[in-house]
Amino acid sequence: MSEPHPAGPPPPADERAAGRPLTVAGALALPVLAAGQPTVVTGESQLDRPVRWVHVTELTDPASFLKGGELVLTTGMPLPDEPARIRRYVDELADVGAAALVIELVRRYHRPPEALVAACRTRDLPLITLSQDVNFLDVTQVVHTLVLGDQTDAMRRTQRIHEAFTALTLRGADPEDVVRAAAEMSGHTVVLENLVHQALICEPSGATVEDALTGWERRSRATPPGDQAEVRGPESWLVAPVEFKGERWGRVVMLPTRHGRPFGPEQVTVLERTAMTLTIARLVHTTTWERRAHRNALRDIAEQRHRSPDELRSRAAALGLPTEDCRFLAVLVDIGPDEDGAESEARLAEDLTAAGIPALTGTLPLGRIGSLLALRASRSPWRQTVERLARTVLDLHPDAVVSVGCEVTDLRHAARSFREAARVAEAVLPTSPKLPGSPERSFHELSDVGLRQLLYALREDTRVQDYAERRLGRLADHDARHHTDLLATLRHYLEAAGNKTTAARRDDLSRQTLYQRLQTIERLLGCDLESGDRRTELHVALMVFDILRPR
């Protein structure tokens, strides 16, 4: 016979506070039983069994009075002597589902019979011995008080769960709010996925996003679906289906904790109500949850709102975006503040899917539509893809502006591509959504940003405005007071690179009149127009004037 083990330490204090049911280990840690110096002889791995009641018996067939989950207490007096009858005694307890057998080694036995130990070990039934006298009535009273209190508390907690999810339903909560509430109430990480095993929402609890989502599709496909909230798959996920218009749409998943504690009735209730609330919410919200997930992920990528590169990659991969051996490219679409971008967003996503290009597409701040393209090295150059997307947008919104950022080879640098695309978008002149001299191209990139475009992007900077005013303000004031057009003469002169003959022809003036006007301009501005530096300064200032005060 192997050596028995003293009963282990009491369960963590938070276990009782968290509302988990009383277990065999928890009962042994109670002072009323600990005083008997309990020793675990068999069934050490089964001490987490819940205790639903205490049954004190001196009968040879106590199983007929049990319903399962009982902590059976006995002095050992009624135990038969024959090994076969002892085995039948243990088999009946195990078959009915008794939580454990506790025998007091004071009156009849001073060590448990070997036949009893062997039978309990065979059925993996916890056998606990007490070397000191214990008042079984006190044990019954204490344990029953705890069990009944647990049941009352469990009913209250279940009621609070129902009330919380009912409130979420009544206020039309977003799916993110529902999943977050589920994680908070259960203490487990909760994930919402669609039918193609894309993780749309992940709310971690006691773990990180990358822990939860790494290899998500592979792990999810290994976990078969179920028709109700139940534990399934090799990782023992608690899963429940989510429906849409009577059809299975996806499922909500509750992941085990790192400690591997089994899911209790409260976690099952939380997941059932989560699935029900999400099913109702799916009917209420007009935007598909895939689009919401793409939009949220895209904003977090563009604004670098992630805790680590691993979290970024695992979250993107869980949405179906490749993260290895790819080039990433940001595309921004400005359709104007008064336009509805929902149709354009959907069309862009559809075109990318039809072209077989993995991407995240969604609406970004400032009303822009953004796409992050994951391009394989073997595919055609990205310009063909962006050109096709741009023409799709322009068919819907002829005045839209499409801009692209730089290619990056690491997803963590995708924010840089978005920043560059935003700088390009800010520099596109409103009078030329199509690129001058390049009518065949419908998008803009950084190489298209020249001096005029740069000044346009900086037009609200007071330093740029002050510069233009200091250089040309007196000339503009003179034109306003005297109804002259010296600014136009200066423009023609500068555009002719200082060639007076060409400038006179453009201004439809005689050379003598042009000379007189240039002398007046030099006098008003206090500069020499023959100086190349001065002409450059004035040309830049004139560009700013034209941008701020379009002709």
Image (spheres, rainbow, N blue to C red):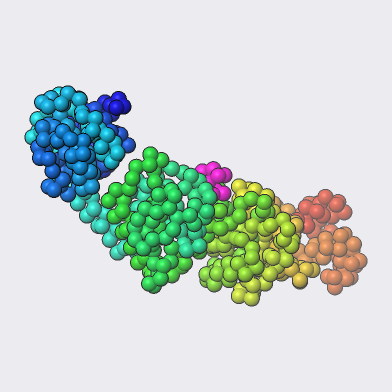
- Helix, strand or loop for the magenta stretch, by majority: helix
Look at the picture and state if 294 lies above or below 96. Answer: below
Q: Is residue 421 magenta?
A: no
Q: Decide if residue 516 is on the left or right side of residue 377.
A: right
Q: Decide if residue 121 is on the left or right side of residue 56.
A: right
Residue 385, by quadrant, is bottom right
Q: Front-most of 333 and 531?
A: 333
Residue 439, by quadrant, is bottom right
Q: Front-most of 439 and 385?
A: 385
Q: Front-most of 309 and 265?
A: 265
Residue beneath the point at 56% across and 49% down:
313
Residue beneath the point at 52% across and 60% down:
294
Magenta range:
307-315
Q: Decide if residue 471 is on the left or right side of residue 365.
A: right
Task: Tally the numbered discs.
Answer: 0
Look at the picture and state if 308 lies above or below 529. Answer: above
Asked whether residue 187 appears in the rendered view, the answer is yes
Residue 111, by quadrant, is top left
The image shows residue 342 at horizontal and vertical percentages of 52, 69
The image shows residue 91 at horizontal and vertical percentages of 22, 43
Q: Front-most of 400 and 128?
A: 128
The image shows residue 466 at horizontal and vertical percentages of 66, 52
Residue beneath the point at 82% across and 65% down:
492
Q: Dividing the image into 4 quarters, which one contains the C terminus?
A: bottom right
Look at the picture and state if 76 lies above or below 458. Answer: above
Residue beneath the point at 73% across and 66% down:
384
Asked whether residue 459 appears in the rendered view, the answer is no
Look at the picture and state if 525 lies above or below 139. Answer: below
Q: Decide if residue 550 is on the left or right side of residue 195.
A: right
Q: Dividing the image into 4 quarters, which one contains the N terminus?
A: top left
The image shows residue 228 at horizontal and vertical percentages of 34, 61
